[in-house]
Image: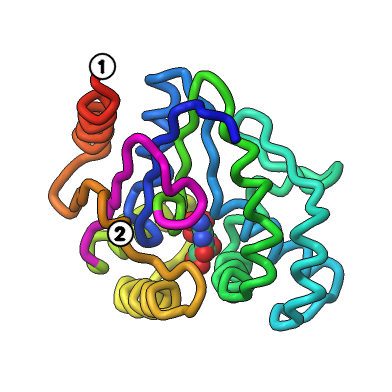
Amino acid sequence: MSDSPVITIDGPSASGKGTVAARVARALGFHFLDSGALYRLTALAALKAGVALDDEAGVAKLAAALPARFDGGAVWLGDENVTDAIRAEAVGEGASKVAALPAVRAALLERQRAYRQAPGLVADGRDMGTVIFPDAVAKVYLTASAEARAERRYKQLIEKGNSASLPALVADMQARDARDATRAVAPLKPAPDALLLDTTHMDIESAVQAVLAHYRRKSGM
Ligand code: C5P
């Protein structure tokens, strides 16, 4: 395995970790892994191929051979640009279902570790610090109250011209948290050595600075 430094940022959905992780990666000139996108791509590939989301062997086979490519901000599945398609609510739901299947997680393990390349990697997900990169130099668990996260998602949806219900979003958020936290494999939980960062009352820039400071402290820079 490469010994390039890894910073892991785990946490529940809509905690802001994707944005924070991408900015930290840019600030350091590191590579960036959005592991959630791999689960979303797997779900999308299954939906397209007509493979049932609970067909563990079938979905794992798709995950192992996933023709995924990340190019700047764009996400490709084969020759199809699926940047927007993987963000659809149904695909997020599907991702959370296929992510509970051990064979699917196993199929994506080495693919995720392969992103660890010089000069370093910022990895965003649920189990980056606990399972995929247990030896990461700096681990962060980013969270915010379900209400704060639902409100952020609500604003995003309204800005894009979609209709949305705040109470329904809070309920969705709590249901997905519960599923991610109680599944048997790689449940969502902070690594014992992770810095806990609650962003309920924190803006993105402060969170980015807190992660960079944590990394500098841990790496002795
Ligand atoms: O982060 P994002 O919302 O894109 O992830 C989609 C789903 O994939 C999550 O709800 C979670 O169930 C799953 N996931 C996971 N492990 C990861 C990243 C995402 O189980 N490392």
Membership of 198 in magenta stretch: no
Q: Residue at x 20, y 27 (%)?
A: 217
Image location of residue 177, percent across then percent down? 37, 73
Image location of residue 115, percent across then percent down? 61, 36
Q: Which residue is labeled 2 in the image?
A: 190
Q: Residue at x 39, y 36 (%)?
A: 7
Q: Which residue is labeled 1 in the image?
A: 221
In the foreground, 35 or 72: 35
What is the number of callouts on the image?
Answer: 2
Q: Quadrant of the N terminus?
A: top right
Label 1 close to label 2 by CB (< 8 Å): no
Q: Quadrant of residue 100?
A: bottom right
* Labels 1 and 2: the sequence-earlier one: 2
Q: Is residue 115 left or right of residue 205?
A: right
- Near mark 1 (Cα within 10 A), the count class, few <14, some 14-19 or many ≥20, is few
Mark 1 CB in 8 Å range of ligand 1? no
Magenta residues span 130-145
Image location of residue 96, percent across then percent down? 55, 71
Gap between marks 1 and 2 measured at Cα: 24 Å
Whether residue 19 is situated above or below residue 88 in the rendered picture: above
Q: Is residue 58 left or right of residue 22?
A: right
Q: Residue at x 60, y 43 (%)?
A: 113
Which kind of residue does numbered mark 1 sit on?
Answer: Met
Which kind of residue does numbered mark 2 sit on?
Answer: Pro
Element on which disc 1 rests: loop
